[in-house]
C-alpha cells in the first residue's frame, strides 16, 4: 500500500547536536508537511512544501530547516537541538494537484533532547 | 492567520451513549474541515471531513455538522464503543496554501 514513512522512529540526542528527521512517501503526492505535536497543543505546522522548488515556513519554523530532495522526500533538520524541541514530529502529505486538501500522516518520530 | 479552538479537552461517556466535540474557527475563508482520530502511540488518521458547501455529512456512527455563519463545526459519535477511545482533532483549511490549522484535541474515553 502507498504510505508515508519516517526515520528514525525514536531519537535521543544532546543539546547542541545537529539532527535530521527524514520523511518518504509512495503516495505520489506533491505536497509535504512537517508538524510538531506537544501535549495539549495539538499539531503545529513547522514547514511545508508544494514541490521540490517550493518551501514555506509554517507557524513555528524558528530553530528548524527543511530540504525537499525529491518529490517523495522531505527532511527536517534541527541545526542545534535544544530541550524544548523535545516533541513528537509528524510528516504529512497531500495531493496530487491543487484540489485535494486531505493530509495523510506518517507514523511519527519521537525526539528527546537532553 | 486561522485560529481553531476545540472543546472539551477531555470527554468521558458510557458505552452506547453519544459524544459531541465542538470546534470554532476564525477565518471566514476556511472551506475544508477534517476530523482526525489519534490512538495512543499512533499517527492521526482522517475519520471524516466536510467542505463549506455542505452543512452535514454522515458516515455510519460518525457525523459532522458545519455552521458557516457561526463559524463552528462539530463531530458527533453515536452508539460509542470502547474502540472509539482516542484523541480527536479538528482542523480548518484556508488560504491559497491550503494549510491546516488544528485544534488542541479532545481525549475521548468510552467507559464500558
Image (cartoon, rainbow, N blue to C red):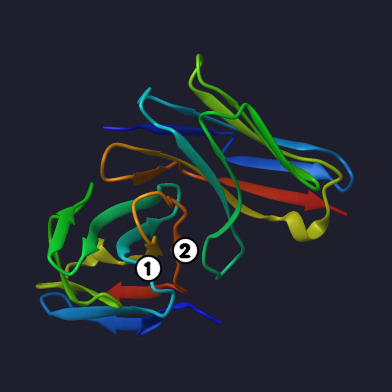
Residue B80 appears in the rendering: yes
| Point 39% across, 73% down: residue | A28
Quadrant (top left, top right, bottom left, bottom right) of the C terminus of chain B: bottom right
Residue A114 appears in the rendering: no
Which quadrant holds residue A88? Answer: bottom left
Between B77 and B60, which is closer to the camera in this rendering? B60
Nearest to N terminus: mark 1 or mark 2: 1
Q: Percent from the top left, x then y, of residue B9?
A: 56, 39
| Secondary structure beneath label 1 | loop
The CA span between labels 1 and 2 is 10 Å
| Point 15% across, 75% down: residue | A15
Q: Answer with left or right where residue B84 lies relative to residue B24.
A: right
| Point 89% across, 45% down: residue | B16
Q: Is residue A84 above or below residue A107?
A: above
Q: Is residue B82 above or below residue B57?
A: below
Q: Answer with left or right where residue B26 lies relative to residue B77.
A: left
Residue underneath mark 1 = A29
| Secondary structure beneath label 2 | strand
Foreground label between 1 and 2? 1
Residue underneath mark 2 = A104
How many circles with numbers are drawn on the protein?
A: 2
Q: Percent from the top left, x then y, of residue B13?
A: 79, 42
Q: Are marks 1 and 2 in contact (CB under 8 Å)?
A: yes
Q: Chain letter for mark 1, please.
A: A
Hey, which residue is sitting farthest top in the picture? B69
Q: Answer with left or right where residue B33 lies relative to residue B54.
A: left
Quadrant (top left, top right, bottom left, bottom right) of the N terminus of chain B: top left
Between A106 and A112, which is closer to the camera in this rendering? A106
Q: Percent from the top left, x then y, of residue A2?
A: 50, 79
- Give me the disc on residue A49: none
Q: Answer with left or right where residue A88 lies relative to residue B39.
A: left
Neighbourhood count class around disc 2 (C-alpha, 10 Å): few under 14, some 14–19, many 20 upward: many
Amino acid at each position: 500500500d502507498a504510505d508515508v514513512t519516517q526515520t528514525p522512529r525514536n531519537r535521543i540526542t544532546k543539546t547542541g547536536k545537529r539532527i535530521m528527521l527524514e520523511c518518504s512517501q509512495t503516495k505520489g503526492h506533491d505536497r509535504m508537511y512537517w508538524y510538531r505535536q506537544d501535549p495539549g497543543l495539538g499539531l503545529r505546522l513547522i514547514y511545508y512544501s508544494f514541490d521540490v522548488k517550493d518551501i514555506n515556513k509554517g507557524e513555528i519554523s524558528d530553530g528548524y530547516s527543511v530540504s525537499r530532495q525529491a518529490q517523495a522526500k522531505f527532511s527536517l533538520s534541527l541545526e542545534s537541538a535544544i530541550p524544548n524541541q523535545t516533541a513528537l514530529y509528524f510528516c504529512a502529505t497531500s495531493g496530487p494537484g491543487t484540489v485535494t486538501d486531505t493530509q495523510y500522516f506518517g507514523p511519527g518520530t519521537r525526539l528527546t533532547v537532553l | 492567520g486561522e485560529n481553531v479552538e476545540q472543546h472539551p479537552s477531555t470527554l468521558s461517556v458510557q458505552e452506547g451513549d453519544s459524544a459531541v466535540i465542538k470546534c470554532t474557527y476564525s477565518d471566514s475563508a476556511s472551506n475544508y474541515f477534517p476530523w482526525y482520530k489519534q490512538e495512543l502511540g499512533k499517527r492521526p488518521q482522517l475519520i471524516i471531513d466536510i467542505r463549506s458547501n455542505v452543512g452535514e455529512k454522515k458516515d455510519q456512527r460518525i457525523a459532522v455538522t458545519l455552521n458557516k455563519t457561526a463559524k463552528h463545526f462539530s463531530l458527533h459519535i453515536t452508539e460509542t464503543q470502547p474502540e472509539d477511545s482516542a484523541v480527536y482533532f479538528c482542523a480548518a483549511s484556508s488560504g491559497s496554501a491550503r494549510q491546516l490549522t488544528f485544534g488542541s484535541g479532545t481525549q475521548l474515553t468510552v467507559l464500558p
